[in-house]
Amino acid sequence: MISHRAKTHFNEMLRRSMAEVLGSAGRAEVSLLPDLQLQGEGQVVMLTVASYSFNLMIFLYFEVDDVIRARVAALQGRDADSLTDRELRDALSERGNLCCGALNREIGRVFPHAGLSTPNILDRRCVEHVRLLNHAHLQHFRVEDQGALLRHATLCVCARGEVDFSWEAAPEPEHTAGELELF
């Protein structure tokens, strides 16, 4: 069972992560949806974050069309016509991975033993079966950037017992230039 407070925190963590990573200027508009009726969106990037007490799955819906191709190409500083379908799917997976990494950083502040998966591309129809999982929380999102719909997302959390926690959002990082991060 997941408490109402934990559900709210999971939703806000993912909302902030998607807003930070998926928008062209680092600020996409992300809203909650009561249900999701998709027409035509063909594939999803599926990512997971796992902890001892829960598994969290994120599904980012996309359809390879001219709008998505142009946005991904712009993010990479390339011409849309030069992207192959494979490069486009890889770039969308990487965006999803960045989003999941931002979410994992926030979850890691509360649950130190959380880890994330590599992205998987699935047919959208697979998500219709998520309701068959023994999930404790299911939430849908709409992601827009500068008034244009970018994609939808679904958050599914399966708990292995009681999940309740208190979380306070980390302060927004200062945007600086010229820094080098070594791993």
Image: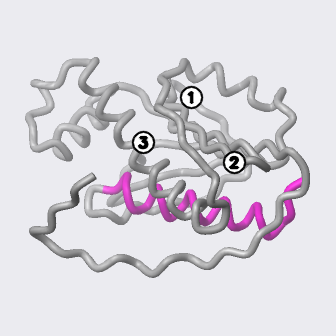
Residue 120 lies in the magenta stretch: no
Q: Nearer the viewer, mark 2 or mark 1?
A: 2
Q: CA distance from mark 2 to mark 1?
A: 33 Å
Residue under label 1: 39
Q: Quadrant of residue 80?
A: top left
Q: Which residue sits at x=53%, y=20%? A: 122
Q: Which residue sits at x=54%, y=60%? A: 15
Q: Which residue type carries mark 2?
A: Ser
Q: Nearer the viewer, mark 3 or mark 2?
A: 2
Q: CA distance from mark 3 to mark 2?
A: 17 Å
Q: Position of residue 9 (x, y in %)?
A: 68, 67
Residue 85 numbered tag: none
**Residue 153 located left or right of residue 139:** left
Residue stretch in magenta: 1-23
For label 1, the crowd category at 10 Å Cα-Cα, with few meaning under 14, some 14 to 19 and many 20 or more, is: few
Q: Position of residue 39 (x, y in %)?
A: 56, 28
Q: Quadrant of residue 62?
A: top left
Residue under label 3: 97
Q: Which residue type carries mark 3?
A: Asn
* Labels 1 and 3: the sequence-earlier one: 1
* Labels 3 and 2: the sequence-earlier one: 2
* Labels 2 and 1: the sequence-earlier one: 1
**Residue 4 located left or right of residue 103:** right
Residue 51 numbered tag: 2
For label 2, the crowd category at 10 Å Cα-Cα, with few meaning under 14, some 14 to 19 and many 20 or more, is: some
The correct choice, above or below, for 172 with respect to 148 in the image is: below
The correct choice, above or below, for 162 with respect to 84 in the image is: below
Q: Position of residue 139 (x, y in %)?
A: 70, 50
The correct choice, above or below, for 87 with respect to 34 in the image is: above
